[in-house]
Image (spheres, helix red, strand yellow):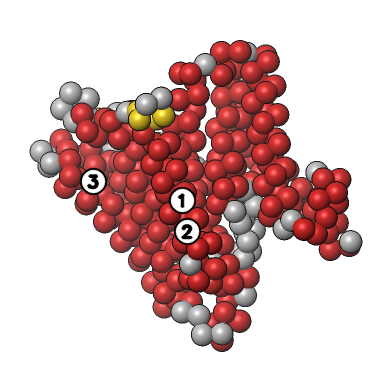
Amino acid sequence: MQELALRLGSGISEVGIQVLCMLVVLVAMVGFTAVKQPQFLSLYQMQTTGREVAILSMFAIGQGMVIIAGGIDLSVGSVLCFVGTLSLYLMQAGWPIGAVIAVAILFAVGVGALHGVLVCYLNLQPFIVTLCSLLVWRSLARWLTNDATTSYQEGAQPLFFWLGNGKVGPVPVPVAIVLVVLLVSLFIMRGTVHGRYLYAIGYNLEAARFSGVRVNALRIFTYAFCGLLTGIAGLIDASSVSTVAPSSAGTLYELYGITAAVLGGCALTGGQGSLIGIIIGAAILKILYKALLFLGVSSLLTDAVTGVVLVAAVFADALIKRRRSAT
């Protein structure tokens, strides 16, 4: 990876180099597993993996935008769990599907905006605010259902079932949705002045403030947007698995989102990152999990492998920065 950084020279940013390296890792991982287990590339497996990557990518993009602006959101797993639990609870109560989706999305956006307000106007630490939210919404999801697993019937809710399990041609609906989300997010971050300001805020918040940037409004937007994408991911996740267990749904998803963002070039100190890189990072995590299962590695070791991958990505990023600074 160091040699690649030196050969590419200064024409490509550090983030670009990391994204290219992660893409090489992803291709190599897929190729190696496919050679060992050819069914890994079957249409069914590709659709299943694509659906899982799409759900992770959805909230990881939101997480990445928060990180780029210098924040962090540890609540995404619990918010995703509560959204899924609330949606199925309301459907069981007889609510129409349109109202269920609207309430779930408004709730998620509201939670994200509240995080932003607490961070920006009360000067609370993002880590503490979102950690408290993680505890609150997980607990409320368990209370709402008496800690019982909630579910829905495909025949009774065909539109909701289609959201997580349908296809547009051979492409799963979640994949189509995340591609639209990616395009919108890229436009926001690269095609608007306010999106470029987010990088400046993460790089140096005070300098951006003194330059006249509406720092608080933009940071609140990132938390609200992260909430929006988490809400969509929660609906898709609940739809795809048909059940939500409040005690376990979305567990550690916030860490998976952060890992995908870091693999995609997001610095936890803020100011840099790639949304396309986040998609690649999410794909690495999900395909790594699938590859381990196909190769006969115990599923109990997947979190350990994820931790090693995250440390390796941070270490490689530090090496690239050091070598580029030296040259």
Extreme residue in the left direction: 94
Compared with 285, 34 (above or below) is above
3D distance between C-alphas at marks 2 and 3: 25 Å
Question: Is residue 87 visible in the rendered structure shown here?
Answer: yes
Q: Residues within 10 Å of mark 3 (few under 14, many from 20)?
A: many
**In this rendering, would 76 be left or right of 246?**
right
Q: Are marks 1 and 2 in contact (CB under 8 Å)?
A: yes
Q: Amino acid at mark 3?
A: Ile
Compared with 6, 95 (above or below) is above
Question: Is residue 78 visible in the rendered structure shown here?
Answer: no
What's the residue at 67%, 14% (across, down)?
Answer: 36
Q: In the figure, residue 323 lies in which quadrant? A: bottom right
Secondary element type, mark 3: helix
3D distance between C-alphas at marks 3 and 1: 22 Å
Q: Amino acid at mark 1?
A: Leu
3D distance between C-alphas at marks 1 and 2: 6 Å
Percent across and percent down for residue 175 are 43, 36
Residue 101 badge: 3
What's the residue at 48%, 31% (across, down)?
Answer: 50
Secondary element type, mark 2: helix
Q: Amino acid at mark 2?
A: Phe
**In this rendering, would 138 be left or right of 307?**
left
Q: Which residue is mark 1?
A: 183
Count of number-bearing discs? 3
Residue 187 badge: 2
The quarter of the image holding the N terminus is: top right
